[in-house]
């Protein structure tokens, strides 16, 4: 009797491992977060579905897992840094793809794409980070620069350094961006005071601060929309 061949693995089944390249894109789109994460973690050598479930429970969601530091991931599991390096590569790919869309047109003319980019880059970071988007005279992105990273609720920012870097780059304008790891994007009093200092310092050199965006898991706050800038 001829043995019945084993059926091909179903990519929708959790823990099925990495799918073959011939699997239609629709199959990937049908996966839930845990099944998709399990595919990424299939090099763990253990049960990738169990590992994916543990990480989602520990960090609270797919975005937070991808944004977690390698040290935090390795403390949460014994899968090893090589497995989690795959997550870092995929996250960086997502950030760069979002940045491509944001740079297709001047920043002011592609505001939705710009916000999507900074949200992809910062919404799930576990610590507060402050970045500046430096723009040329046509409002094209010259440089996206990390300025400071701090604790869960504070990142030290020095307005003179923000402006000095704009002069170094021959920038004409800038957009300030930072995240709130708490998830709530509401600007704090310290955020407002710091922004006013940057705006005042920039004005001396005829530099414009278009906006200050505060990124949180629960949304994005715009200083300009709130009348704070």
Image (cartoon, helix red, strand yellow):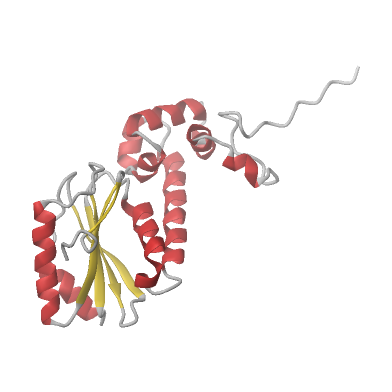
Reply above or below: 6 against 155.
above
Pinpoint residue 13: horizontal percent, then vertical percent: 60, 29
In the figure, residue 129 lies in which quadrant?
Answer: bottom left
Q: Is residue 136 left or right of residue 208?
A: right
In the figure, residue 202 lies in which quadrant?
Answer: bottom left
Q: Is residue 174 left or right of residue 115?
A: left
Q: Would residue 135 be visible to someone looking at this image?
A: yes
Q: Residue at x 9, y 67 (%)?
A: 197
Pinpoint residue 75: horizontal percent, then vertical percent: 31, 33
Pinpoint residue 26: horizontal percent, then vertical percent: 64, 43
Pinpoint residue 64: horizontal percent, then vertical percent: 35, 41
**Quadrant location, the N terminus:** top right
* Residue at the outermost right position: 1
Depth check: give the residue in front, 79 or 204: 204
Count of numbered tags: 0
**Quadrant location, the C terminus:** bottom left
Q: Is residue 164 left or right of residue 47?
A: left
Q: Would residue 46 be visible to someone looking at this image?
A: no
């Amino acid at each position: 009797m001829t043995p019945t061949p084993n059926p091909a693995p179903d990519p929708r089944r959790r823990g099925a491992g990495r799918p073959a390249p011939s699997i239609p894109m629709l199959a990937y789109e049908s996966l839930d977060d845990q099944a998709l994460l399990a595919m990424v973690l299939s090099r763990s050598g253990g049960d990738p579905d169990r590992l994916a479930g543990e990480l989602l429970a520990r960090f609270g969601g797919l975005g937070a897992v991808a944004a977690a530091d390698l040290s935090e991931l390795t403390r949460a599991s014994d899968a090893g840094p090589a497995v989690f390096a795959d997550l870092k590569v995929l996250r960086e790919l997502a950030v760069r793809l979002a940045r491509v869309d944001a740079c297709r047109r001047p920043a002011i003319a592609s505001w939705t794409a710009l916000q999507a980019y900074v949200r992809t880059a910062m919404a799930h970071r576990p610590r507060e980070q402050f970045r500046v988007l430096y723009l040329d005279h046509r409002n094209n992105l010259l440089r996206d620069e990390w300025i400071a990273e701090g604790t869960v609720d504070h990142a030290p920012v020095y307005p003179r350094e923000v402006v000095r870097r704009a002069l170094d780059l021959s920038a004409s304008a800038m957009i300030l961006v930072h995240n709130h790891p708490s998830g709530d994007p509401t600007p704090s009093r310290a955020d407002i005071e710091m922004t006013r200092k940057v705006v005042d310092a920039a004005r001396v050199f005829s530099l414009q601060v278009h906006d200050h965006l505060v990124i949180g898991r629960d949304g994005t706050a715009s200083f300009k929309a709130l009348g704070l800038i």
